[in-house]
């Protein structure tokens, strides 16, 4: 499974390597007024169940907005917000939020050991792949493959997304990569990984 995941990651990175049109961060800041209530003025959301957008890869932000607009990814708050956005709006918003500095997070001390083990080495007994195979040793992600930066992300948000992938409530991952990885993760492993990435920087 780990070899398969790395192989697919490399192929996806090569396949989506086409450069996107650059957005305008200044225009994105102006257009972000409707985003501020949830994601904060600088993309650092105060509510831990809403993701930090600051410092996220623009390619990933745009993909999620496209998915919300198309109904591929569903959320009662985000889906209506994405509906009126044009491709240029998405480029501009992605450029603005990616240019912001993410506020760092910390890891709960009791989650470091298990979180680090799963993030860096997976679980060979249950065939759970290491998270860093796609998201990198420091959680920086891979913008070409649209794998998000997860370092510093709110643990509560990460935990919910992992559980949503596991249940199938979220299904906009390429080639079911996330769903295949989390299918065999326990609640304890998910909580530990979520806490661990919150403290990565």
Image (cartoon, rainbow, N blue to C red):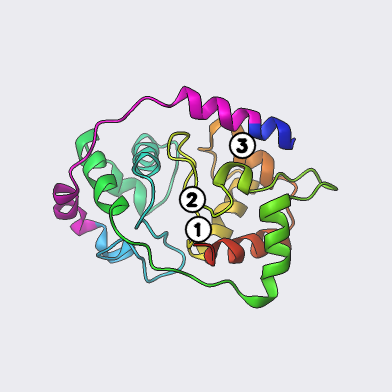
* Horizontal relation, residue 14 to residue 100: left or right: right
Q: Quadrant of the N terminus?
A: top right
- List the residue tagged with mark 2: 140
Q: Residues within 10 Å of mark 1 (few under 14, many from 20)?
A: many
Residue at the spot x=58%, y=60% of the render? 159
> How far apart are labels 1 and 3 at the CA level?
19 Å
Which secondary structure dominates the residues rendered in magenta? helix
Vertical relation: 177 (above or below) 42 = above
- The answer to whether mark 1 and mark 2 are in CB contact below 8 A is yes
Residue at the spot x=37%, y=34% of the render? 70
Tag 2, which secondary structure?
Answer: loop
User: How far across and down, in percent of the image, does residue 78 sit?
Assistant: 35, 51
Stretch in magenta: 7-34
> How far apart are labels 2 and 3 at the CA level?
18 Å
Q: Check residue 24 for magenta coloring.
A: yes
Residue at the spot x=29%, y=46% of the render? 94
Say whether disc 2 or disc 3 marks the residue closer to the N-terminus: 2
* Horizontal relation, residue 31 to residue 150: left or right: left
Vertical relation: 114 (above or below) 4 = below
Residue with the most extreme right position: 125
- List the residue tagged with mark 3: 177
Tag 1, which secondary structure?
Answer: loop
Say whether disc 1 or disc 3 marks the residue closer to the N-terminus: 1
Say whether disc 1 or disc 2 marks the residue closer to the N-terminus: 2
- List the residue tagged with mark 1: 151
> Which marked residue is nearer to the observer: mark 2 or mark 3?
2
Tag 3, which secondary structure?
Answer: helix
């Amino acid at each position: 499974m780990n070899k398969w995941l790395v192989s697919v990651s490399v192929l996806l990175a090569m396949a989506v390597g086409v450069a996107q049109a650059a957005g305008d961060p200044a225009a994105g800041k102006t257009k972000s007024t409707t985003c501020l209530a949830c994601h904060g003025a600088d993309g650092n959301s105060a509510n831990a169940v809403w993701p930090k957008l600051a410092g996220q890869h623009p390619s990933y932000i745009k993909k999620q907005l496209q998915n919300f607009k198309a109904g591929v990814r569903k959320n009662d708050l985000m889906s209506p917000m994405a509906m009126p956005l044009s491709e240029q709006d998405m480029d501009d918003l992605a450029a603005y939020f990616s240019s912001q500095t993410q506020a760092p997070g910390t890891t709960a001390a009791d989650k470091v050991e298990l979180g680090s083990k799963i993030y860096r080495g997976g679980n060979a007994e249950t065939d759970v792949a290491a998270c860093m195979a796609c998201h990198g040793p420091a959680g920086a992600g891979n913008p070409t493959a649209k794998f998000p930066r997860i370092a510093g992300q709110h643990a509560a948000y990460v935990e919910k997304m992992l559980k949503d992938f596991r249940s199938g409530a979220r299904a906009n991952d390429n080639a079911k990569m996330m769903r295949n990885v989390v299918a065999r993760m326990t609640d304890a492993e998910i909580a530990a990984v979520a806490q661990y990435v919150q403290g990565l920087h």
